[in-house]
Image (cartoon, grey):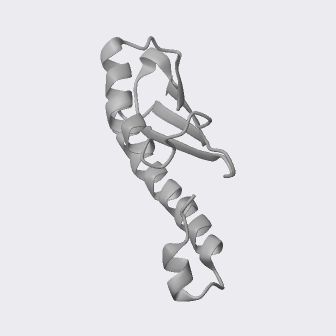
């Protein structure tokens, strides 16, 4: 899986990159584990040094044969924004995969559907 990470109006530190990989990318890998998948992460400081609830995490996941999934979360800190984006992204990915799985076996007898490969 290809991971693109960038900071907008802020500098990405190694600890921030590691946190995003551990708490966001690792959870997405369960759903998008092939080489053609791509995760695009943008960490944004909207107001700059002014402060406030202005840290944003934007994540776009592109997988073959699926529509792109985009999530944006805003919070007081980047760590909170990353965690909130991860939670929403996991729900969206699970829904998309389950929907594909249901369509794949829809109309088949139960014994055949149980043995059908999942893609």
The image position of residue 74, as x and y in percent, is: 46, 39
The image position of residue 62, as x and y in percent, is: 63, 41
The image position of residue 59, as x and y in percent, is: 54, 37
Image height of 34 relative to 110, above or below: above
Q: Residue at x 44, y 11 (%)?
A: 11
Q: Is residue 23 left or right of residue 55?
A: left
Image height of 101 relative to 108, above or below: above
Image height of 75 relative to 101, above or below: above
Q: Nearer the viewer, residue 30 or 84?
A: 30
Q: Is residue 4 left or right of residue 19?
A: right
Q: Residue at x 58, y 74 (%)?
A: 102
The image position of residue 69, as x and y in percent, is: 61, 48
Q: Residue at x 48, y 59 (%)?
A: 94
Q: Residue at x 54, y 35 (%)?
A: 58
Q: Quadrant of the C terminus?
A: bottom right
**Could you tell me how many numbered marks the image carries?**
0
Res. 63 image quadrant: top right
Res. 40 image quadrant: top right
Q: Nearer the viewer, residue 71 or 94?
A: 94
């Amino acid at each position: 899986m290809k991971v693109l990470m960038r900071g907008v109006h802020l500098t990405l530190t190694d600890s921030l990159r590691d946190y995003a990989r551990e708490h966001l990318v690792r959870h997405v890998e369960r759903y998008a584990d092939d080489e053609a998948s791509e995760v695009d992460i943008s960490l944004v400081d909207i107001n700059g040094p002014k402060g406030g609830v202005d840290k944003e995490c934007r994540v776009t996941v592109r997988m073959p044969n699926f529509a792109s999934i985009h999530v944006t979360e805003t919070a007081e800190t980047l760590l909170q924004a990353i965690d909130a984006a991860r939670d929403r992204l996991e729900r969206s990915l699970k829904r998309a995969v389950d929907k594909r799985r249901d369509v794949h076996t829809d109309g088949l007898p139960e014994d055949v559907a149980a043995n059908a490969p999942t893609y």
